[in-house]
């Protein structure tokens, strides 16, 4: 059994307006003093299967991304468990690569115990380096949801019998 490790991966393209929301949320997490120690922060961008090695020892994976679920722009979305597998590939520019990544991790025996995807409904995805106002407004709630998730996992891991909970350097 793997030693518990939590990772947050930011997905997106910083040159594609609202598609950058996952990467920008990850950048904010890097500066967040409330982030539990030992949480790995990984700039996934559009890497897809190239993330196999960095995520090989991860037991709890949180992905941040722009997700087109047909909701109002700026809506913060959460998918976990079977809901991730059931998401149509059109929901995220990166979902096919992310889905392939999780599938490959399962085949190699490296799949995380728990996976959660948090996203923001984009208003538009086009060439540009600025988020639209709804996506910009959603960054705070997305960050709060991400912190809540990693804190919950940290508490869950700490409560495991025999957990040695050493600080991990990301």
Image (cartoon, helix red, strand yellow):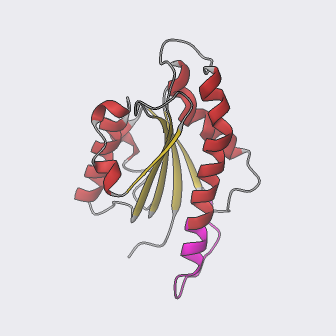
Q: Is residue 95 magenta?
A: no
| As drawn, 136 above or below 35 | above
| As drawn, 98 above or below 113 | above
Q: Residue at x 28, y 37 (%)?
A: 88
Residue 56's x, y, as percent? 39, 57
From this viewpoint, which residue is outermost toward the top? 127
Q: Is residue 164 magenta?
A: yes
Q: Residue at x 26, y 51 (%)?
A: 103
User: Quarter holding the C terminus?
Assistant: bottom right
Residue interval drawn in magenta: 153-169
Q: Residue at x 74, y 45 (%)?
A: 31
From this viewpoint, which residue is outermost toward the bottom? 162
User: Quarter holding the N terminus?
Assistant: bottom left
From this viewpoint, which residue is outermost toward the right? 33
Quadrant of the rendered image containing residue 135: top right
Residue 14's x, y, as percent? 55, 24
């Amino acid at each position: 059994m793997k030693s518990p490790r939590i990772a947050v991966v930011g997905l997106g393209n910083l040159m594609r307006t609202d598609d950058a929301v996952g990467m920008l949320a990850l950048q904010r997490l890097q500066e967040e003093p409330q982030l539990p120690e030992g949480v790995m922060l990984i700039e996934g961008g559009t890497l897809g299967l190239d993330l196999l090695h960095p995520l090989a020892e991860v037991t709890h994976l949180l992905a941040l991304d722009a997700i087109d679920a047909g909701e109002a722009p700026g809506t913060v979305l959460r998918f976990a468990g079977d809901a991730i597998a059931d998401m149509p590939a059109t929901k995220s520019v990166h979902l096919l690569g992310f889905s392939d990544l999780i599938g490959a991790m399962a085949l190699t025996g490296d799949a995380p115990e728990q996976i959660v995807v948090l996203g923001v409904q984009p208003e538009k995805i086009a060439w540009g380096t600025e988020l639209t106002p709804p996506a910009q407004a959603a960054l705070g709630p997305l960050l709060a949801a991400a912190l809540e998730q990693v804190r919950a996992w940290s508490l869950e891991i700490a409560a495991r019998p025999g957990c040695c909970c050493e600080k991990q350097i990301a």
